[in-house]
């Protein structure tokens, strides 16, 4: 009986994770797209060109999750804190933005997938501008384009944006889809971790 309880609990835990982690709502509807664009109209943290690219991206929604590639040149100089006006390191504002951004990302089914600090200059490049001094690259997982838009229009995200502007000298980002690689996402590693924990627990109960 204990075995059924242990493995049933493990299966339930994983099912709850997948209920949160996967997109069960399908692709964006036209009325949803119109609502998101209406909420972004007049926002100070975007441009008409960026809105056009965003509109094309969400209109082409396939309902799948994706990784957003981000590259950032942090502001290492002292700057005025947007909230208090005090002079603080620019990097501290970027870190504060990340602390505000990440909970909103997780609440919408996303998470940081890879965060890496740059440790050298360009090893190979052509047809591009000189390295401006990038600081960090990151891959952020979004559950769906709908969830990305929920984050974009979230008041907490908008409120945190001044910190990003003050702490960032240059940045760009674009969405990506997998082609090849050995990145193992939570769907697999969490399943293995839960199964391992259940197996160890089951063995312990059998040995008593």
Image: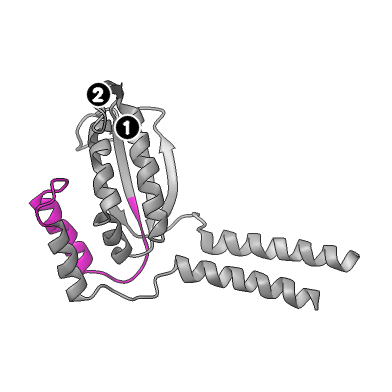
**Viewer can see residue 39:** yes
- For the point 10% across and 52% down, the residue is 49
The C terminus is located in which quarter?
A: bottom right
Residue 86: x and y in percent read: 27, 23
For the record, the magenta segment spans: 41-68
Query: Could you say which quadrant of the image residue 198 lies in?
Result: bottom right
Residue 110 in sight here: no
Q: Residues within 10 Å of mark 2 (few under 14, many from 20)?
A: some
Which comes sooner in the sequence, label 1 or label 2?
A: 2
Q: Indicate the position of residue 122 as horizontal and vertical percent values.
A: 32, 31
Between 64 and 111, the one nearer to me in the picture: 111
Residue at 22% across, 76% down: 29
Locate residue 65 relative to residue 165 in the image: left or right.
right
Task: Answer with the quarter of the image where residue 191 lies.
Answer: bottom right
State the residue position of label 1.
Answer: 93
**Structural crowding at the residue carrying mark 1, measured as other residues with C-alpha within 10 Å and reported as few (<14), some (14–19) or many (≥20):** many
Q: Position of residue 19 (x, y in %)?
A: 48, 71
In-image side of 205 versus 150 (left or right): right
Query: Does 49 lie within the magenta span?
Result: yes
Quadrant of the image occupied by residue 59: bottom left
Circle 2 SS class = strand
Mark 1 and mark 2 residues within 8 Å of each other at the beta carbon:
yes
Q: Residue 79: which disc? A: 2
- The structure residue drawn at horizontal position 39% and vertical position 70%, both measured from the top left corner, is 23
What colouring style does the render use? Answer: one colour
Compared with 149, 29 (above or below) is below
């Amino acid at each position: 009986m204990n075995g059924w309880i242990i493995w049933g609990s493990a299966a339930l835990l994983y099912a709850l994770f997948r209920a949160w982690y996967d997109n069960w709502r399908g692709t964006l509807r036209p009325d949803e797209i119109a609502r998101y664009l209406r909420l972004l109209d007049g926002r100070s943290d975007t441009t008409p060109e960026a809105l056009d690219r965003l509109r094309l991206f969400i209109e082409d929604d396939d309902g799948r999750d994706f990784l957003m590639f981000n590259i950032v040149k942090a502001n290492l100089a002292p700057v005025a804190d947007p909230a208090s006006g005090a002079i603080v390191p620019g990097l501290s504002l970027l870190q504060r933005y990340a602390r505000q951004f990440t909970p909103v990302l997780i609440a919408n089914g996303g998470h940081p997938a890879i965060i890496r600090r740059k440790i050298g200059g360009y090893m190979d490049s052509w047809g591009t501008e000189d390295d401006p001094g990038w600081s960090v690259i990151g891959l952020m997982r979004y559950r769906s384009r709908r969830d990305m838009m929920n984050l974009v229009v979230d008041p907490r995200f908008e409120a945190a944006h001044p910190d990003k502007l003050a702490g960032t000298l240059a940045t760009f980002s674009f969405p990506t889809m997998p082609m090849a690689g050995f990145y193992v996402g939570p769907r697999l590693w969490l399943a293995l971790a839960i199964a391992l924990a259940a197996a160890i627990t089951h063995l312990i109960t059998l040995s008593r």
